[in-house]
Image (tube, helix red, strand yellow):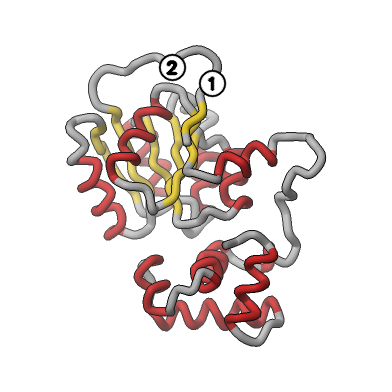
Amino acid sequence: MTSQGSGQPAERRGPVRVFLVDDHALFRAGVRAELDSAAGDVEVVGEAGSVAEAVAGIVHRQPDVVLLDVHMPEGGGAEVLRRVRPDHPGVVFLALSVSDAAEDVIAVIRAGARGYVTKTISGHELARSIRRVAEGDAVFSPRLAGFVLDAFSERPGAAPVGDPELDLLTPRERDVLRLLARGYAYKEIAAELFISVKTVETHVSSVLRKTQLSNRYELSRWATDRRLV
């Protein structure tokens, strides 16, 4: 879903210069390959796997668009935004995440991202989304735009952003819980998040302890009640 601001966005000529930020090198390589095949529409000019590398690389390269992972150590995508945007307002940020949780979407948009798409997006649609945000549009994956409208709306019934119980979980624990509630096996979760099965088990144990639940079926209900699924 793409929403436009007032007026028509200015058309760009030539490829959009893109900087990739994600803490998984394998995922960055996959995204770079997809974008490199986008018929010259985008050009990857750099990449980074940490907040510090991202800040330094963005400042040096001055890309048109930063494709930004939400969940990384040392503050994640929001920290990159906080450290770059004040002095480089011309750089546009598009969040790309496995998470489609309302709190993640809202947090990164509040920090200054122009759009938010999930990692299920196709290479063609990703290239199109990058160009759209470069041209001034706000771009969201299906169903995510509603979270943003609710968060910035004062109308009655708008969805609450915070949840004290959810706040106990780390971003990665939420990712694991969300996939678990969707019926993914541990091996599938590990493959989706680029982590080991042992790490998945550790996260599940931690979530069970924090929520004081006893099995994955109770966790699934708990996640569903909080609209994580």
Image spot of residue 37 (x, y percent):
18, 40
Q: Is residue 186 left or right of residue 5?
A: left
Q: Residue at x 57, y 47 (%)?
A: 105
Q: Name which quarter of the figure residue 211 lies in.
A: bottom right
Mark 2 highlights which residue?
A: 9
- Binning the other alpha carbons within 10 Å of mark 2 as few (below 14), some (14 to 19) or many (20 upward) gives some
Percent x, y of residue 197: 40, 80
Q: Describe the element under mark 2 as helix, strand or loop.
A: loop
State the residue at coordinates (30%, 57%): 27
The label shown at residue 5 is 1
Q: What amino acid is found at the position of numbered circle 1 in the picture?
A: Gly
From this view, report whether residue 212 is shown above or below residue 148.
below
Q: Find residue 133 and report its horizontal and vertical position in percent.
A: 42, 29
**Amino acid bearing label 2:** Pro
Rendered residue at 42%/45% (across/down): 68
Q: Are marks 2 and 1 in contact (CB under 8 Å)?
A: yes
Relative to residue 228, is residue 205 depicted above or below? below
Using the numbered discs, state the Cα–Cα distance from disc 2 to disc 1 in whole angstroms. 8 Å
Relative to 104, is 90 on the left or the right? left
